[in-house]
Image: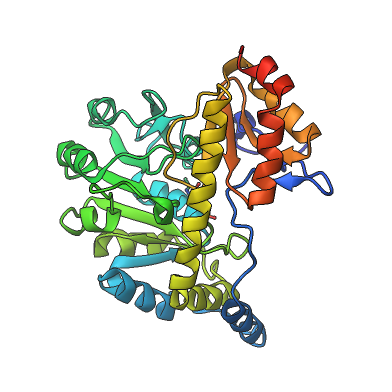
Amino acid sequence: MTAHIRPDLESIPAYVPGRSHPGAVKLASNETTTGPLPAASKAVAEAVELANRYPDNQSGELRAALAEFLGVTPAEVAVGCGSVALCQELVQITCGDPSDEVLFAWRSFEAYPIITQVGNATAVTVPLREHIHDLDALAAAITDRTRLVFVCNPNNPTGTAVGAAELGRFLDRVPADVLVALDEAYYEYLRIPGDHPDGVELARTRPNVVVLRTFSKAYGLAGLRVGYAVGAPEVIASLLKVHIPFSVSRVAQAAAMASLEARHELLDRTDAVIAERERMRAGLLAAGYRVPPSEANFVWIDLGASTAEFAEASAAAGVLIRPFAGEGVRVTAGDPHENDLFLRFATSADTVARFTGA
Ligand SMILES: *Cc1c(COP(=O)(O)O)cnc(C)c1O
């Protein structure tokens, strides 16, 4: 006889690592293509020298640096083992009963349904409208059981974003006892003119709003696992209670500190990524694909039933992308030569004929 395991976990698919072909170009995980800055590598090497000692469980130095950068107090900042850990911790601090509801759009970040189920809560989803958050429908779906709402802006995997005014109107409709998490993993790639949605600004006057950002994307530290939450001190204090002790390593804290200090260099690089994103979208649109405007470091191609087949063909052409069966694929904007390889595949006469019906 084997040990008893929660039977409901059977409905969660076992983790299947993304296929990696030796030599293939990987545009599947929204990573940046350049390695850490020399200053970050140096900080990592120095931190390793103290690996026999536990890290600072409160990430005090990093929280202080983030607070200064964001214009808030350290009591309003929590750090997590990637912002995905903070997503899970938000479910833990808001939900305690299986009837408690976690609300989010679909399709959105694939971790949301999983962490909701792992947290023993009930997921409630509202469809996107033309690949964009339908904030009216989301507000209308709030019930007296709703405990937490995730709004991923820009949205992974469709890349679309809602502006500050629209987001503000939505937040005004949310009852004060419902926590809203604005997941801004791709914040640094946003270029909405005039209506820039800055979650930290929106949260300043709303104690039921918490913002999630990460060092994994524009800051280029996906392999070291560090993200952060900005919100009311009561929310942040609760996050610290459920935090897995010492789960943000000394190395991660040191690299994040160094990368934050050198942020101008890292943020300058986002312009090149955005230029590539726009170039990819233009090329795909010209070839007849349906590609919504993106405010992130990737593009979404609406492929419906041919999604899996398209992703297979792309892999065979040497480019790994992320398929969402039956819906579409997400393609990260990588280096120009990597994107060229993908565009050559996607816009070849053969592929176009097969997948755009043109
Ligand atoms: C990548 C991503 C995250 C966080 O990633 P971490 O590496 O855990 O910080 C969070 N939310 C969304 C929507 C993402 O795409």
Instruction: Report if residue 118 is visible in the image.
Output: no
Question: Residue 160, image x and y in percent?
Answer: 40, 37
Quadrant the C terminus occupies: top right
Residue at x 44% of width, y 78% of height:
261
- Residue 229: quadrant of the picture: bottom left
Give percent across and percent down for residue 199. 29, 53
As rendered, which of 351 and 136 lies closer to the eye? 351
Left or right: 208 as drawn, with respect to 290? left
Q: Report the residue at 46% width, 35% height from top.
A: 108
Give the x, y percent position of residue 130: 39, 23
**Residue drawn at x 82%, y 49% as measured from the top left:** 23
Residue 56 seen by the camera: yes
**Residue appearing at x 55%, y 66% in the figure:** 247
Q: Is residue 315 left or right of residue 179?
A: right
> Which of the pair 182/351 is nearer the observer?
351
Residue 270 in percent (x, y) is at: 48, 58
Viewer-side residue, 323 vs 225? 323
Q: Is residue 123 above or below residue 185?
A: above
Question: Quarter of the image containing the N terminus?
Answer: top right
